[in-house]
Image (cartoon, rainbow, N blue to C red):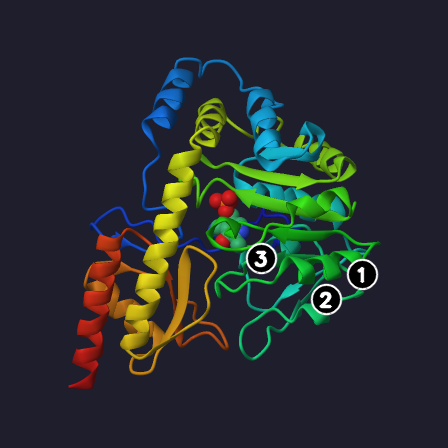
Amino acid sequence: MSKYFSAKYAALTPYVPGEQPKDAQYVKLNTNESPFAPPQSVIDAARLEAGKLHLYSDPESAALTKKAAEVWGVKKSQILMTNGSDEALNFAFMAFCDENHPIAFPDITYGFYPVFAALNGIPYETIPLRADFSVGYEDYLAIGKNIVIANPNAPTGMALSLVQIEEIVKSNPSNVVIIDEAYVDFGGESCVPLIEKYNNLLVTQTFSKSRSLAGARLGVAIGNEKLIADLNTVKYSTNPYNVNRMTAAAGLAILGETEWFENNRKAICENREYTTAALKELGFTVLDSKTNFLFAKSDKVKGKALYEGLKAKGVLIRHFNTARIADYVRITIGTKEQMDVFLAKTKEIIEEAAK
Ligand code: PMP
């Protein structure tokens, strides 16, 4: 830390992203990206925009916003495009939370929430997941605090039902409830239709997972138009050109690739079921995932040993060395071929451990 670093950030512990190795070739199952490269139409659209990079992007991302509003079935005033959904979440923390408006979220969830809170000087309460790792939705009823819940949750992969989400939103009318639907396309129920009924619901989604654009950084916030106007106030006070030209073009193109999208999310769900069954045969406990990753625990090898063993064999997965989940690993669902490599190496590690 330099002597110039602001005291307000002195205690900040930044978010640690999953490894993005530059040296060796890995089967990369550690950051919940899509294993499928975007289709040619997306590459062509981004390339075309590259020739206009001397000009600022459209601060309103008008063409993309119009198309996204159609896809999500909302008005243009109810949607905001952002630089990844991380930015939408940070905008929401900035816009709706402060020392008098704290936020609550599960103790085991997306690791960025406490960082956004700390960054913005927001007090937060963590509510423990139940013993089976589900979000105890009753714990969020009428709590009189802002709330953020990843649904499906990460890194567990488990989801709440739409009815349970509605109960939470309905019972906290004086607070904003943010539902982070980064993984909803892999089997969760989206609560976007509820935004018409509840003016305190904000939903975020991402193009990083089911739409294969993690590297482009594109996210979306959907909610009542007054909430979106507030997010715009924050956006225009930080980074008006938050979505760059190439990303806006890529995003517009991918939203037109309906069949490609459906095929890919179906493939991920199939590979997930295939991997779940194979892991259970190897003696793993596997949580019920509605996402593009699995959260699983071996009855023979500790989480850290499995992570390290797989890394040595060229397969990257994620291990969180924190209370309650240290025995687990998180495995992103890739192609069938990638999952076969992962399963074969996992089997080797288990056999080596038994010797
Ligand atoms: N929410 C959750 C639960 C996530 O796991 C992620 C991905 N790390 C994000 C939000 C942010 O994704 P992005 O910024 O790529 O849209």
User: Viewer-nearest of labels 1 and 2?
Assistant: 1
Q: Position of residue 333 (x, y in %)?
A: 35, 56
Res 11 seen here: no
Q: Nearer the viewer, residue 244 or 255?
A: 255
- Say few, some or many: other residues with alpha carbon within 10 Å of mark 2 (under 14 / 14 to 19 / 20 or more): many
In the image, residue 227 sits, relative to residue 60, either above or below, namely below
Q: Is residue 334 visible?
A: yes
The answer to which of 15 and 93 lies nearer the viewer is 93
As measured in the structure, the alpha-carbon distance from the residue carrying label 3 to the one carrying label 1 is 18 Å
Amino acid carrying label 2: it is: Tyr
Q: What is the quadrant of residue 294 in the picture? A: bottom left
Sequence-wise first label, 3 or 2: 2
Answer with left or right where residue 230 lies relative to residue 126: right
Q: Residue at 40%, 21% (x, y): give it.
A: 45
Q: Which residue is found at the position 46% from the left and 52% from the top?
A: 186
| 186 is higher (above) or lower (below) than 104 | above
Residue to which mark 1 is pinned? 171
Find numbered disc 2 in the image and state the secondary structure of the residue it sits on: helix
**Mark nearer the N terminus (1 vs 2):** 2
Whichever of labels 3 and 1 marks the residue nearer the N terminus, that label is 3
Q: Residues within 10 Å of mark 1 (few under 14, many from 20)?
A: some
Disc 1, disc 2: CB below 8 Å? Answer: yes
Q: Is residue 40 above or below residue 187?
A: above
Q: Which residue is mark 3?
A: 151
| Marking on residue 142 | none
In terms of depth relative to the viewer, which is nearer, 139 or 258? 258
The amino acid type found where label 3 is placed reads: Asn
Q: Pointer 2: what residue? A: 140
* Residue 243 place in picture, x, y as percent: 54, 29
Which residue type does callout 1 highlight? Ser
Choose between 124 and 354: the one closer to the eye.
354
Q: CA distance from mark 1 to mark 2?
A: 8 Å
